[in-house]
Amino acid sequence: MRDPELDELRAKVDCRTVLERDGWKLDAPESTTHAVKFRNGPAQIIIVTHEGRGWFDPINDQRGDVLALAQRLTGGNFGHARRALRPLAGIAPTLTPTFRDRSQVAPLDAGKAWSRAAALQPGSQAWRYLSGERGLPAATITRANDAGLLREGIYGTAWFLHRLADDAPAGWEMRGPKYKGFAKGGDKALFWIGQIREARRVAVTESAIDALSLATIEQWPEGTAYVSTGGGFGPPTAETFARLLPSSCRLVAATDRGQGGDILADRLRELAAGSCAGFGRVRSSAKDWNDELRGRAE
């Protein structure tokens, strides 16, 4: 069941306030109205979005809500985050100048753009990237391609489709030999392969390549759906999970090793407590599931 206090903390505590109280410094020249940059020394950067409700780290692609931010700063679990955030509820950030507003990113017509993009072809640049550098077997690539989940971008970049609960395209992860990102103007919802609505087990990773890697390692067991959040957990992701997850399924956090993976696993544990029959976690022996898959092939 949902925890009312956690929902209240998400609504009432501003990420900018949390960073200010932790000693982070505002980088006003590099900030905009919708993306406020904070620094902690020369190497650590966090950008706050959604009017203080979300954040991301542009260096390692960690992101989340204010609870995830508190966990990152304290190194603790949801209980530690809860205690740290309670005194900050309703407190506005001290530094609230009006930033220049750079040109807005136009919303992406994801359905139209996806339908116009080229499907992968055996031997294409993106296919060779997935099979060579990423070590995915041809059978796995073919399975995802036949399901309509892959497209070919420029410079050998593979696209992995994120969908909403009604199967409508929302955006796509982009991975290639020289590029890593997400479709500009699109929304991170969920990438999934398998019959998620009827699944007995739903394994959640942080990238589509990891989802396909884990499925390959586990040899595609019947009744399991493999999912990627794309490293995020914003409103489209939460809503899609809420509408898709069968109440009878076991939700499995197959997240990366490290703090980012632990934060997402805690969020999934909370989600499972209110909507699923059980929760578990599986960890790769390497940093992530694609590293493990490639290691097994050596």
Image: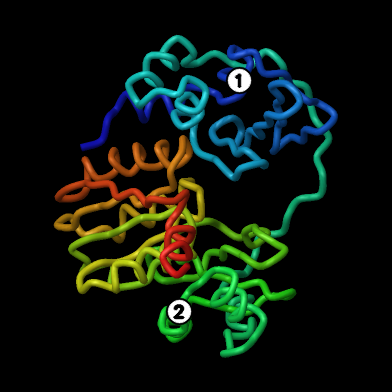
Distance (Cα) linking label 2 and label 1? 44 Å
Residue 265 falls left or right of residue 248: right
Kindly identify the residue that appears in the image at 43 percent across and 52 percent down.
237
Q: Earlier in the sequence, mark 2 or mark 1?
A: 1
Q: Which labelled disc corresponds to residue 19?
A: 1
Locate residue 82: give its quadrant.
top left
Residue 34 in percent (x, y) is at 69, 38
Q: Secondary structure at mark 1?
A: helix
**Taking 7 as reference, is 79 above or below it?**
above
Q: Which residue is mark 2?
A: 137
Kindly identify the residue that appears in the image at 61 percent across and 42 percent down.
60
Locate residue 75: give its quadrant.
top left
Q: Amino acid at mark 1?
A: Leu
Q: Which labelled disc corresponds to residue 131?
A: none
Taking depth in this image into account, of 184 and 68 the one nearest to the observer is 68
Taking depth in this image into account, of 252 and 116 the one nearest to the observer is 252
Kindly identify the residue that appears in the image at 36 percent across and 26 percent down.
77
Locate residue 267: give its quadrant.
top left
Residue at the far bottom: name it: 122
Residue 14 in percent (x, y) is at 55, 24
Residue 198 in percent (x, y) is at 21, 69
